[in-house]
Amino acid sequence: MVRTDGRPTIAWSDSAEVVDRQLDGGSGSDILVDHCGSLVLLRPLTDGGSEFLTEHAPDDAQWLGRALAIEPRYLQGWIEAMIYLFIPFE
């Protein structure tokens, strides 16, 4: 889904195949939620997604490369924040 209003879109996956496709630019999403079991990676797929994560991540955030690493217990809060900010899911 491509947005024209400047707000990022996100995609969800816990499948390595889907993650690879998303990282190769397969959907037009800005952020990929990659559930890895004991942690969740919020992977920016575009500059807009990267800016969104950087702006909303706490100062003590853990980054793995460009991906924001969070514990699964915090995922609901991130999703609620994204919904509140009107970010559509694909």
Image (spheres, grey):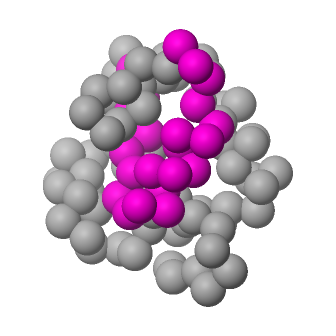
Task: Determine if residue 35 is in view.
Answer: no
Horizontal side of 52 relative to 5 (left or right) equals left
Residue 19 as seen in the image, left or right of residue 80 = left
* Residue 61 in view: yes
Asked if residue 26 is positioned above or below residue 57 in the image, the reply reads below
Q: Return the residue found at the far bottom.
A: 4
Residue 59 position within the rendered picture, expressed as x and y whole percent measured from the top left: 58, 19
Residue drawn at x 25%, y 33% is: 65
Q: How many marks?
A: 0
Residue under the image location 50 percent in, 79 percent down: 1
Inspect the magenta stretch and tell me whether residue 81 lies in it: no
Q: Is residue 12 placed above or below 41 in the rendered structure? A: below
Residue 40 lies in quadrant? top left
In front of the other: 9 or 66: 66
> Does the segment drawn in magenta span residue 43?
yes
Judge by depth and name the residue closer to the eye, 87 or 38.
87
Q: Residue furthest toward the right?
A: 84
Q: Position of residue 2 (x, y in %)?
A: 51, 82
Q: Position of residue 89 (x, y in %)?
A: 59, 63
Q: Which residues are magenta?
A: 39-60
What residue sits 64% from the left and 68% below the top?
7
Tell me what residue is drawn at x 35 percent, y 37 percent. 67
- Does 67 sit above or below residue 46? above
